[in-house]
Amino acid sequence: MEPTAPSPRRAARLLFSYLPMALLAGLLSACAARPVPGPQASIAPPAPAPAPPPPPFMVAAGPAITGTASWYRPGPHLHRTCTGDYFTGRAMTAASHTIPLGTRVRVALLDDTSRSVVVKVDDCMPRGRRILDLSEGAAEDLGIMNAGIARVSVTPVRLVDSQ
């Protein structure tokens, strides 16, 4: 038997059934965008981190007071300061009856002006001959632990942004 050609009707049916699919495939492939290349790996080292802001410095905010300072350590019981905080011996704090609570002051030894500390007044003390009672930590930094008392200059200070 000899191969026969498809009938014209069958050929038309095949043509019209595959033609829309071929046109649709052509249109969809024409609308496809080219792939966008991804980000390239950077070989350069990362930028250095920005430098931290400079620390604030202290400037005088009032006249200096000179007098005698001592240091104190309350008993073994928990001691609340006049501000309501618990007293911590290692903190840089002080008690005064003349300087307002919350004031930061620079305490400098009159005998050795190179030694000074900045403390926060957070406690009251009874009126007496001393102008300041320092915490144990502040007294140790000043170097008056053995003597117990010292002549000091007390200057109220405030923080100033150095920018």
Image: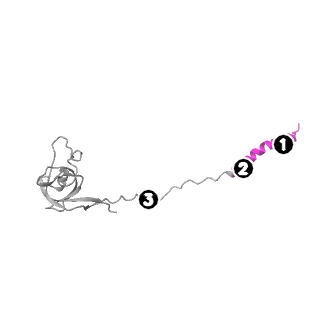
The reply to whether callout 2 and callout 1 are in contact (CB within 8 Å) is no
Residue carrying label 1:
12
Determine which residue is flagged by label 2. 27
Q: Is residue 5 visible?
A: no
Give the distance between the C-alpha atoms of the residues marked 2 and 3, in whole angstroms.
47 Å
- Is residue 157 part of the magenta span, yes or no? no
Q: Residue at x 78, y 45 (%)?
A: 19
| Residue 56 rendering spot, x and y as whole percentages | 30, 59
Q: Which residues are magenta?
A: 1-30
Q: Which quadrant of the figure has residue 12?
A: top right
N-terminal label among 2 and 1: 1
**SS at badge 3:** loop
Residue 21: image location, x then y, percent: 75, 44
Q: Residue furthest right?
A: 1
Q: CA distance from mark 2 to mark 1?
A: 22 Å
Image quarter hosting the N terminus: top right
Amino acid tagged 1? Ala
Q: In the picture provided, is 154 more to the left or to the right than 56?
A: left
Report, in whole angstroms, how far the alpha carbon at label 3 lies from the one at label 1. 69 Å
Q: Identify the mark nearer the N-term, 3 or 1.
A: 1
Q: Amino acid at mark 2?
A: Leu
What is the three-letter code of the residue carrying label 3?
Answer: Ala
Give SS at disc 2: helix
Q: Between disc 2 and disc 3, whose residue precedes?
A: 2
Q: Residue drawn at (16%, 45%), measured in percent from left and top?
A: 74
Residue at 11 percent across and 54 percent down: it is 129
Q: Nearer the viewer, residue 115 or 130?
A: 130
| The furthest residue to the top | 1
Dot 2: within a 10 Å radius of its alpha carbon, few (fewer than 14), some, or many (20 or more) residues? few
Task: Give the labeled residue for mark 3.
Answer: 47
